[in-house]
Image: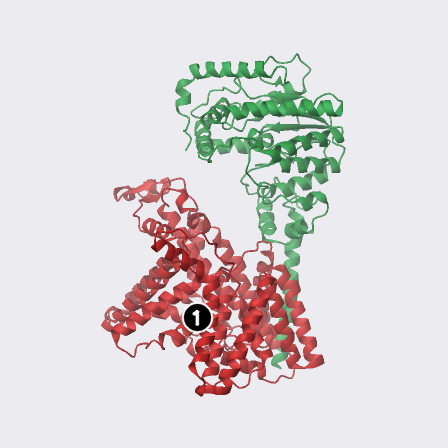
Chain colours: A red, B green
Amino acid sequence: MLFNSGIFLFAFLPLAMLGFGLAFRWRGLEAAWTWLAAASVVFYGWWNPTHVPLLLGSVTLNYLLARRLSHQGAQSSNWLLVAGVIINLGLLGWFKYWHFFASNVAALFGQEWHGQPLELPLGISFFTFHQLTYLLHCRAGKDQGTSFRHYLLYVTFFPQLIAGPIVRPHEMLPQLKRPRERVFPWSDLSVGFTLLSLGLFKKMVVADSVAVWVSPVFDHVHDVSHVAMLDAWVAVLAYTLQLYFDFSGYSDMALGLARMFGVDLPANFFSPYKAQSIVDFWRRWHITLSSFLRDYLYIPLGGSRKGPLRRSVNLVLVMFIGGLWHGAGWTFALWGLWHGVCLLINHASTQAGLMQRLPRLPGTVLSWSLTFLAVIMGWTLFRSPNIATAGSLIQSLFGLNGMQVPPGWLEKLPFLSKIGVTAHADWQIFGGPVQMAVLAGLLVAAVALPNTLQITRAFFTPPNQAGLPEESTRWQWMPSPRWAVVIAAALTLSLLHLGRISEFLYFQF
Amino acid sequence: MEAAFHRRFILQLALGLIALLGLAVLLNRAANPYCLFATDWLPAKSKPETFTHLRLVKAMQVRHVKPQAVILGSSRAETGLSPEHAGWKARPAYNLGLSDARLYEIKSYFEFACSQAQVKQAMLLLDFTAFLPGGRNSPDFSEERLQGFSAEDYLLGLCSWDATSGSLNTLLGRQGEKSYLANGSRDVSVENARVKAKGGALRAFLAYEKRFMTAGTAPTHLDEEAQQVFRDILAVARRHSVDLRLAVAPVHARYLEMLDRCGQAALFEEWKKWITAEVEKEAVDSKQSAFPLLDFSGYNEFTTEPVPEKGLATYYLESSHFTQALGDKLLDRLFSDEAPATPGAFGFRMSSAQMEAHLTAIREARERYHRERAEELASLPQPQ
């Protein structure tokens, strides 16, 4: 069941809300949370009911471990925590990485691996991280007698179960304990529907529309001798935009849905393509994953406290692991390494003060351009089915497979012929000026327009607000007729796109 | 106080949503881009969305028109055969050809037409490739649609972005990828314009042939499922007492050369023998006269038409799709009571008894064609 499907919007969500409201009225808040947890398990089981026992078993085992850790607090033996980490990562590793590991080891010894990859339980990467953070939370003695009901909901809460955001226990559990006089206050509904509508619009109208320019190139690189330069640029830029609008749209929907039930989830995106450095990019892109890796991997490894060499190794290692978290494949690992190296260059450049020596405007433009170029090179690796494909595409991007333009361009701009540009008519996806204008327009929207968190700032404060960039906007959402028209238009356009169902990209990670 | 603003916002949002969705539904009903309804509130010159929703549009048009004569087949039938031909005695006649159709889809639409009206006349333009393994039903093919009311079709046709943008295209008179007439045939003038846009007939031929030659490995046998579906089509016609006539498509001689170069010439002959035997077997089983089965492929003055370098050919758009000029000659022959053609000739009525003579005549004609057109054939793309 996808958030952008009719069954979710017109059956699951109304039923979940109705049951939540009735349970609260008849049995109180705790019964309402129980209903919500049960609805979340149904939501999870809708894809593949056989994975429900795995989810519930994992939740129960972790809760029991957490109780032991909690009782013993900071004095608890390390082995209990180590056992919990091993169980969770072991489960993730078995389902997600075993095939990758075995096939690579076999290849190392010149053997062929005949095993088939296991079917990956949906959202396993996310609920594993949720449970690890909870164990660490308890080990630190910060848990205050969380009930199983609350813990189950913390892990399975349907807005964040499948693709995040990765929620820390202290960001959600206190909200469940807060007493309420009523559920579904009008303010929660208006803010929730606004975030949900904006998320649906980003996903269904924007991301899915540019998606048609992505697969024909990335999935069929080997069907042609090489991808023409403009085809490669269209595909890579379209994917860059698709991934952002898809994933940030999903996150907006998650935030909006949770808000309807009176829960504020942490922000996951803050206009990442506005970043002027790779460090800045990771403060804005998949924020909850970045902070998880920082707090639970980078800092325990020593962070920047053990000298520049150790910091560099830590950075690259963390990004490498972050890459592999996205998928068991060398393209993901290489994508992580690429970002690790970019971060090193970023730190070195900052220390040398390179950008500060430039005048402000050229410096800003250069910083943004280099950052964006590094990011889209990374996405080329990320989306490609294998490294050879990524290499071929990157060669095409930089004209190393020849520079081709439509024949008409050569007639209008004859100097192009003199620099080796040739005429090409058999384009895979390049569609001329209208397509270029669409991509440019969306890029400008991603770079220049305020994001949903900025727009709704007066009415929505995510728990990780303190870590977000301080950027305000004059566009402030209000429960006003003007905004009602804007949101109704966004929701109408999204609902009109309902017939075109497509999965969220981050479900696979 | 603040709660009142939020409550009012929710109300305004709900009203705005209902109003905007209502507007979209009204627009889509008025423009009727997929012919869901028999009449348009805002009539337009053409329906540019037909090609992208072909199976939906043709199913709906069959419901509205209730044809008593239907043309069955793939895009070759859609392009080259006219329901306005005088041979169609039963009216209205409708071109139910479906681009890129599998035989199963053709059968399903034939059955559907028979369920909607008393179909008296039908012709099936037989396409050899439809009998080869592989291929899937088109994504817009729906069994549910042909079995009764499909709520999904009405939902998507009235309340979807596809329909809304389709309505705007319809009302603004935009040109679709392919253009269709109300009788189900493709608009010939638009097809000709496409050939001209490609740079003339020769370029169109070569572009098609290049695609054909790079289509992958050649099958070595006929598809058993398609063979069964062919039998089913004959049974449907017999069950509904339809005057069904079968015709092997008049592909250009260059197309036959491509089949040969791909190693499919022998299978093509086997296929002709098989369909002939099946038609005869059905006649014996049903104790009625056999459905006429005429072969329009081969080497004759039409199928060997020289391809002009510039401009348009008279009988072909490219080596597979023929024009209505040739389609009319085919239908003349199919509906005529003239003396039967000799083996190998255009429109020879195939029978097992004369099959060898027919195939031998075609092989001899091919030898002559090779001798006389060696230079032209040298330009044909090679298989890849």
Residue A380 in sight here: no
Q: From the viewer's side, name the closer residue of A505 and A473.
A: A505
Corner quadrant of residue B375:
top left
The spot of residue A260 in percent (x, y) is 60, 73
Horizontal arrangement in the rendering, residue B298 relative to residue A13 (left or right)? left
| Residue A73 in the image, given as x and y percentages of width and height | 47, 86
Which class describes the residues within 10 Å of circle 1: few (<14), some (14-19), or many (20+)?
Answer: many
* Quadrant position of the C terminus of chain B in the picture: top left
Name the secondary structure under disc 1: helix
Chain name for mark 1: A
- Asked if residue B205 shows in the view, the reply is yes
Q: In this view, does A373 lie above or below A70?
A: above
The amino acid at mark 1 is: Leu
Q: Quadrant of residue A105?
A: bottom left
Depicted B271 relative to depicted A358: above or below: above
User: What number of labels is visible?
Assistant: 1
Q: Nearer the viewer, residue B267 or A422?
A: B267
Q: Residue at x 56, y 71 (%)?
A: A57
Q: Looking at the image, is B330 positioned above or below residue B11?
A: above
Report the residue at 42% width, 81% height from top: A78
Towards the viewer: A355 or A135: A135
Give how far across and how far down residue A503 sits, in percent. Answer: 53, 58
- Judged left or right of residue B337, residue B382 is left
Residue that label 1 marks: A289
- Across and down, in percent, residue A321 comes to 38, 66
Quadrant (top left/top right/bottom left/bottom right) for the N terminus of chain B: bottom right
Quadrant of the image occupied by residue A361: bottom left
